[in-house]
Image (spheres, rainbow, N blue to C red):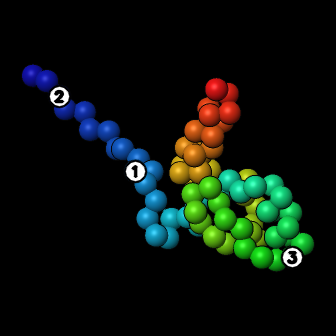
Amino acid sequence: MSETVIKPVEDTRLSEGDHDRYAHYVRKADIMSSAVEGHEVIALCGKRWIPNRDPDKYPVCPDCKSIMEQLRGAQGN
């Protein structure tokens, strides 16, 4: 008799409110400017917000991570 093993699969696609669960990649100059002037920044994935929390406490946004990996790969060519 064979057994079926069921493994949960993590869905990394982002829904409308999921962006707040992640840390996002943003240009360093934009972060510095936002800290001084208080304007919003735009992450690689398109999320717009005014940074006000410690990104080290959250996992990296899967969309930002994928885009960053593609950019790094393109720079190496």
User: Is residue 66 depicted above or below 13 in this figure?
Assistant: above
- Which-is-in-front pick, marks 3 and 2? 3
Tell me the distance, in whole angstroms, between the alpha carbons under discs 1 and 2: 25 Å
Q: Amino acid at mark 3?
A: Glu
User: Is residue 39 depicted above or below 75 in this figure?
Assistant: below
Q: Position of residue 63 (x, y in %)?
A: 53, 51
Residue occupying image coordinates x 54% and y 49%: 62
Residue at the disc numbered 3: 37
Question: As drawn, which residue projects farthest toward the bottom?
Answer: 38
Residue at the disc numbered 2: 3
At mark 1, the secondary structure is loop
Residue 59 in sight here: no
Question: As drawn, which residue projects farthest toward the top?
Answer: 1
Residue 13 in sight here: yes
Question: As drawn, which residue projects farthest toward the front?
Answer: 77
Residue occupying image coordinates x 58% and y 63%: 46
Return the disc, 3 or 2, that comes first in the chain's sequence: 2
Return the disc, 1 or 2, that comes first in the chain's sequence: 2
Q: Position of residue 27 (x, y in %)?
A: 75, 55
Residue at the disc numbered 1: 11
Tag 1–tag 3 contact (CB < 8 Å): no
Residue occupying image coordinates x 81% and y 55%: 28
**Occupied quadrant, residue 8:** top left
At mark 3, the secondary structure is helix
At mark 2, the secondary structure is loop
56 with respect to 48 (left or right): right
